[in-house]
Image (tube, rainbow, N blue to C red):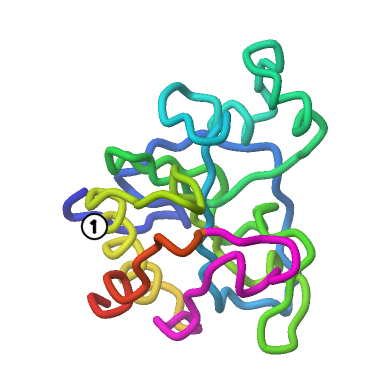
Amino acid sequence: MSAIDIQDHIVSNASYMPSPNHDLRPEEADISLIVIHCISLPPGVYEGNQIEDFFLNKLDISQHEYFNSIKDLKVSSHLLIKRDGEVIQFVPFNKRAWHAGISSFNGVDNCNDYSIGIELEGTDNSEFTDQQYNCLMEISKLLILNYPNLCKERIVGHSTIAPNRKTDPGSFFNWSKLLDNL
């Protein structure tokens, strides 16, 4: 991605696919946290549009046995960064995406209220691509510039805010590659 900005809480060069899985943030909540996740559907498979379909409530559960276990979930993230660096936005940043679930950061519960969720196409036990890191770095810088309560110290993994439930983005995520370049 090059020469990107944020217009009306949407990344200018992202494909925008509005997800129904969001609602309004509480009035008192300020965007002050970025949560990094990873997802692949089915697990370990990196082709197709199953992630997009899942966030849009259009997942064809007949495509894979695993999809039966997630068919009733209503989730979304603000952004998905695919393996090739393609960026898809599902929820405007000023809205509350349903990505974190039961969560807490620095004693403040309900991270969805004040966070931006970014999914990387991948798994907890595999490396991410250079294209994904490059996009994530550029978008993180842009978010920090546009939302004054964000800073690199407030970029965390899903495992940080839900340690007993989640392990993503996993041990293969290179935190220093991201944070040292912000």
* Residue 174 on the magenta segment: no
Where the C terminus falls, by quadrant? Answer: bottom left
Residue type, numbered disc 1 = Asn
Percent coordinates x, y for residue 82 in the rendering? 38, 40
Percent coordinates x, y for residue 18 in the rendering? 57, 36
Of all residues shown, which one is farthest toward the right?
Answer: 72
Q: Nearer the viewer, residue 89 or 85?
A: 85
Q: Residues within 10 Å of mark 1 (few under 14, many from 20)?
A: some
Left or right for 18, reference 28: left
Q: Is residue 52 above or below residue 59?
A: below
Secondary structure of the residue carrying tag 1 is helix
Left or right for 85, reference 82: left
Q: Residue at x 37, y 72 (%)?
A: 175
Of all residues shown, which one is farthest toward the top?
Answer: 62
Q: In which quarter of the view is residue 141 placed?
A: bottom left
Q: Residue at x 46, y 55 (%)?
A: 8
Q: In which quarter of the view is residue 121 placed?
A: top left
Q: Is residue 38 above or below residue 167?
A: above
Q: Nearer the viewer, residue 145 or 109?
A: 109
Q: Residue at x 31, y 51 (%)?
A: 132
Left or right for 22, reference 47: right
Q: In which quarter of the view is residue 67 placed?
A: top right
- Where does the magenta region start and end? 149-168
Left or right for 71, reference 56: right
Percent coordinates x, y for residue 105 in the rendering? 67, 81
Q: Is residue 144 above or below residue 1?
A: below
> Circle 1 is placed at which residue position?
134
Percent coordinates x, y for residue 13 in the rendering? 30, 44
